[in-house]
């Protein structure tokens, strides 16, 4: 205990003396225990947010909080700031730093347990003989106190088991904070809250860089644009801004420019080492290979498509691990993402294995390196993936024999590239072939693609897809924006196809009769195929199809009653077509979850009400349901199968009184259910409703969306988001 004495010799102004004492005591109490940062830019708002989550003044419960993020994002800095702010409100407190590093030494495991107890009890002589006995001692002693415990940089379950495995170990009101890069650990521990630390915004980034590069809050006048360039490279990562800013201090503008160009090719070593910790900590080589494949080729791609392509690596589990470790993100549209510095770190890991000989690396994507290999024919069997994306104005004609030695090449991405020669020279084990602007009228007969899982020929010159070979493994075929394509491929040669994308093929005028052979197809996208006539009867035999998009197919003016044969169909998007009638069989479907019939003229006003009534009314009781006003009890559970219905009619169209009553009944019923079991998604839907112009007659009730009238930008955005989910 520290005692401080003040002697007051003058009593002329006693109130001033008291104020002075209060200020001094408050200063001592608020004095930081842990060093946070020399320039804690952006720390305060993040700390305030987490302190609110902690609700540390609640004395009864034990709460666990996880702070999650990639290396260098500021997890430890924020945890220290929280500790400084609230530690004095607990009976005991302990901050255990760098657990990942210290845990590697077996003696340090027991030492961490001993230190935890010493910090809490303020005793120097506490001895623990083994980790297992330490667990028992911790449980006995910590349960007597209200403690604040921060475990910094945890990366293994054993660390949690040894230090805070059960909330029953701690006294009421205790708060345990864990910083980690691995979300899976927080799931194991069942923490109450997980907070993923956000990167710095541009304003915070400029300030962070300026403090370290210029020792002031803003950049010097001549360095404003250069500072913005560095900030863009660092991507809001505090560690990178600090390290690179310190490196650039007192350097001239030309040196800044040179440094920025070099960073684009070779990441800063200090930042690289920090980020690589997460990569090296992955469980096995398969997870590392998946990370590198994403870093080189698959950022921005659909997660499920990547899982198909990388099936040999058990990619579904692997990607989940990468997400948990904060190495990869998956957005609301199921697209894979990665921080730019993590991407560069992955590419540097590959480069540094053969810095002088690109052809000996396992992956290539930098234009100069790829062109060097292909023009000089220096590729080797080590190459597994190659990407060459050229602008239209700078296309190259390369020789197929440049690929002869690339026996293990499985991922090939080309854009605006022409190949000449014998296509037998290309690798025989390509899993993913992306060729933007494929330059041939048809597939060369000797182009072996039987091992391919995904083929993407967007903006191709294909006129027809000849039956050149049996592609048993192919699951994804994308021929979108192929202006000359006239017919769909012969499906007999594609028995396991799951996605067929033919968006914006304006001359596509025939769907092969063999389409019914696609017994595993899940998605067909024919949007804006303006020459396509009504769908053949064989098309309706696709019993596995879940999503069909025929929006913009202006020559399609009807859907057949056979639609009910498509027993798996969930999503039907038919905007801006010539359809004037919807087959009544559609309401008998037990799978339909989303229907969009927006933006065409001549839509019959009778179809919309009958569609709604049929879904909502009990069998055999349609008329009585429409006529009664007390019908809330008649709304069956079947309506919940309809996840979304979007109908766009002319501005003059008005809902009849009966239909309005039905919708109001549905609204009342749904709101009653919402009050009983509110969820986050439902609350979001209600909040969306309040922001929408009522003049559009737009109504949203939980899973049911009905749109009538002029479409606003807000409703368009909402609808697009929903379509992304179902696509």
Image (cartoon, rainbow, N blue to C red):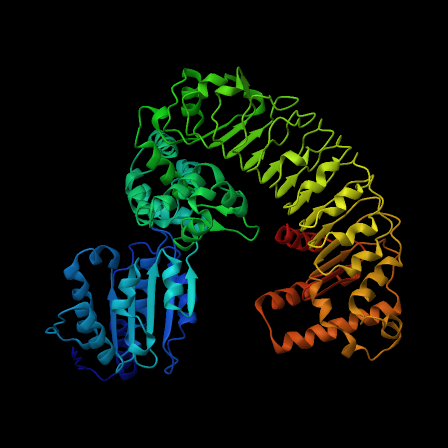
Where on the picture, by quarter, is residue 296?
top left
Please give the count of numbered marks on the rendered protein. Answer: 0
- Residue 177 is situated, as x and y percent measured from the top left of the image, at 34, 67
Who's the residue at 47% across and 31% down the image? Answer: 429
Residue 323: give x, y in percent of width and height: 43, 52
Task: Tell me the residue at 29%/70% (across/down).
Answer: 164
Residue 711 appears anywhere in the view:
no
Specify the farthest residue to the left. Answer: 125
Q: Which residue is at the front of the view, 14 or 190?
A: 190
* 17 sits to left or right of 254: left
Can you say which quadrant of the picture contains the N terminus? Answer: bottom left
| Left or right, residue 463 beside residue 56 | right
Q: Where does residue 140 sit, x and y in percent of width and height?
A: 23, 80
Quick check: 595 above or below 272? below
Give the left or right position of residue 584, taking residue 43 as reference. right
Task: Name above or below for residue 595 compared with residue 486.
Answer: below
Q: Position of residue 570 (x, y in %)?
A: 69, 55
Task: Left or right? Give the position of 77 relative to 453.
Answer: left
Reply above or below: 344 against 140.
above
Could one spot residue 656 in this view of the protein?
yes
Q: Quick one: 20 or 591, which is closer to the camera?
A: 591
Q: In this rendering, is residue 607 above or below 659? A: above
Q: Quadrant of residue 516?
A: top right
Residue 66 figure quarter: bottom left
């Amino acid at each position: 205990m520290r005692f401080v004495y003040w002697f007051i010799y003058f009593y002329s102004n006693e109130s001033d003396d008291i104020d002075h004492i209060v200020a001094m005591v408050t200063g001592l109490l608020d004095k930081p225990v842990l060093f946070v940062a020399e320039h804690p830019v952006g720390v305060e708002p993040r700390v305030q947010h987490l302190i609110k989550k902690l609700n540390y003044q609640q004395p009864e419960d034990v709460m666990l909080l996880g702070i999650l993020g990639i290396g260098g994002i500021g997890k430890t800095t924020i945890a220290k700031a929280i500790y400084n702010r609230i530690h004095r409100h607990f009976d005991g407190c302990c901050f255990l730093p760098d657990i990942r590093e210290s845990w590697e030494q077996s003696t340090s495991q027991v030492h961490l347990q001993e230190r935890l107890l010493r910090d809490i009890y303020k005793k120097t002589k506490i001895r623990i003989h083994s980790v297992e006995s330490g667990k028992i001692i911790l449980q006995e002693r910590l349960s007597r106190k209200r403690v604040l415990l921060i475990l910094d940089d945890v990366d293994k379950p054993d660390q949690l088991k040894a230090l805070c495995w059960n909330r029953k170990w701690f006294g009421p009101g205790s708060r345990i904070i864990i910083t980690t890069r691995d979300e899976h650990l927080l799931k194991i521990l069942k923490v109450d809250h997980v907070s993923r630390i956000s990167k710095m915004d541009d304003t915070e980034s400029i300030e962070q860089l300026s403090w370290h590069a210029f020792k002031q809050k803003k950049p010097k006048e001549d360095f404003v644009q250069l500072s913005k360039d560095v900030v863009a490279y660092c991507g809001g990562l505090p560690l990178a801004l600090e390290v690179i800013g310190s490196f650039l201090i007192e350097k001239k503008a030309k040196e800044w420019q040179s440094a920025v160009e070099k960073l684009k090719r070779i990441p800063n070593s200090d930042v690289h080492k920090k980020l690589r910790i997460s990569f090296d900590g992955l469980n096995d080589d398969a997870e590392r290979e998946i990370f590198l494949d994403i870093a080189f080729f698959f950022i921005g791609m659909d997660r499920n498509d990547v899982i198909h392509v990388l099936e040999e690596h058990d990619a579904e589990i692997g990607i989940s691990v990468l997400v948990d470790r904060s190495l990869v993100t998956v957005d609301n549209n199921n697209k894979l993402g990665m921080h730019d510095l993590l991407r560069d770190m992955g590419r540097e890991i590959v480069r540094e294995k053969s810095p002088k000989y690109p052809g000996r690396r396992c992956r290539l994507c930098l234009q100069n390196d790829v062109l060097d290999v292909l023009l000089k024919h220096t590729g080797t069997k080590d190459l597994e993936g190659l990407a060459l994306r050229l602008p239209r104005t700078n296309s190259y004609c390369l020789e197929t024999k440049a690929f002869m030695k690339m026996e293990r090449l499985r991922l090939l991405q080309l854009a605006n590239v022409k190949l000449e020669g014998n296509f037998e020279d290309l690798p025989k084990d390509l899993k993913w072939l992306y060729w933007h602007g494929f330059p041939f009228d048809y597939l060369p007969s000797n182009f072996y693609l039987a091992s391919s899982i995904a083929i993407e020929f967007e903006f191709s010159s294909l006129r027809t897809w000849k039956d050149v070979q049996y592609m048993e493994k192919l699951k994804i075929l994308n021929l979108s924006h192929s202006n000359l394509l006239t017919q769909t491929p012969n499906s007999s040669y594609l028995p396991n196809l799951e996605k067929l994308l033919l968006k914006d093929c304006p001359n596509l005028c025939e769907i092969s009769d063999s389409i019914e052979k696609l017994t595993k197809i899940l998605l067909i996208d024919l949007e804006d195929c303006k020459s396509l006539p009504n769908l053949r009867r064989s098309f309706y035999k696709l019993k596995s199809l879940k999503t069909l998009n025929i929006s913009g197919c202006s020559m399609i003016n009807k859907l057949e009653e056979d639609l009910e044969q498509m027993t798996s169909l969930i999503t039907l998007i038919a905007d801006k077509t010539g359809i004037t009638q919807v087959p009544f069989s559609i309401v008998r479907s037990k799978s339909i979850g989303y229907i969009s019939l927006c933006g065409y003229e001549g839509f019959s006003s009778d179809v919309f009400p009958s569609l709604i009534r049929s879904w909502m009314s009990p069998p055999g009781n349609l008329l009585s349901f429409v006529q009664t006003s007390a019908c809330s009890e008649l709304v069956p559970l079947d309506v919940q199968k309809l996840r979304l219905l979007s109908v766009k009619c002319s501005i003059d169209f008005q809902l009849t009184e009966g239909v309005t009553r039905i919708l109001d009944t549905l609204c009342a019923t749904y709101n009653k259910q919402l009050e009983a079991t509110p969820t986050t998604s439902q609350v979001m839907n209600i909040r969306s409703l309040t922001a929408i112009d009522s003049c559009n007659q737009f109504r949203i009730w939980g899973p049911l969306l009905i749109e009538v009238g002029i479409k606003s930008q807000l409703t368009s955005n909402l609808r697009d988001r929903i379509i992304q989910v179902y696509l």
